[in-house]
Amino acid sequence: MTKMKGTKGSASKRTKAASADAEAKAAMPKSKASREELCVFAFRLTEAERDAIHKAAGPAKASKFARRLLVAAAQKDAAVVKAIMEGGKMAE
């Protein structure tokens, strides 16, 4: 069996580049690390419900809007729920 030319060299270059990328990512500060540990809570919506949430929340803020509203309702915080309902677009 003969060895293919360039195989060993290119593989080691990719490995070195990948390890350099991994080291660079590890060196980056983790700004979210100090935040509270989060988990996923998912549920199904109709397209109309999803569109209504996006319209009420504004662009790229639907998840945060839904989370704030759900948590406020679960904590029976009527003032926050009312403020979210009246403000619509993520007034913080």
Image (tube, grey):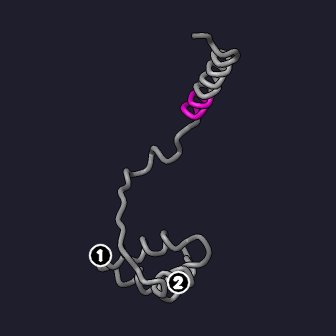
Q: Residue at x 35, y 84 (%)?
A: 78
Q: Quadrant of residue 66?
A: bottom left
Q: Quadrant of residue 68?
A: bottom left
Query: Between 65 and 60, which is closer to the camera in this rendering?
Result: 60
Of badges 1 and 2, nearer the viewer stands: 2
Q: Identify the secondary structure beneath mark 1.
A: helix
Q: Does 24 lie within the magenta span?
A: yes
What range is drawn magenta here?
Answer: 21-27
Q: Identify the secondary structure beneath mark 2.
A: helix
Q: Residue at x 62, y 21 (%)?
A: 11
Position of 39 relative to 11 (above/below): below
Q: Residues within 10 Å of mark 1 (few under 14, many from 20)?
A: few
Res. 74 mark: 1
On the image, the x and y values in percent for residue 74 come to 29, 75
Tell me the amino acid under the disc marked 2.
Answer: Asp
Residue 14 horizontal side relative to residue 51, left or right: right
Q: Does 79 lie within the magenta span?
A: no
Q: Residue at x 62, y 31 (%)?
A: 21
Position of 85 relative to 36 (above/below): below
Residue 92 horizontal side relative to residue 4, left or right: left
Q: Which residue is tagged 2?
A: 51
Query: Between 7 and 74, which is closer to the camera in this rendering?
Result: 7
On the image, the x and y values in percent for residue 43 come to 35, 73
Q: Residue at x 60, y 28 (%)?
A: 18
On the image, the x and y values in percent for residue 73 come to 33, 79
Tell me the amino acid under the disc marked 1.
Answer: Ala
Label 1 – label 2 distance at C-alpha: 23 Å
Res. 6 mark: none
Quadrant where the N terminus lies?
Answer: top right
Q: Residues within 10 Å of mark 2 (few under 14, many from 20)?
A: few
Upstream in the sequence, badge 1 or badge 2? 2
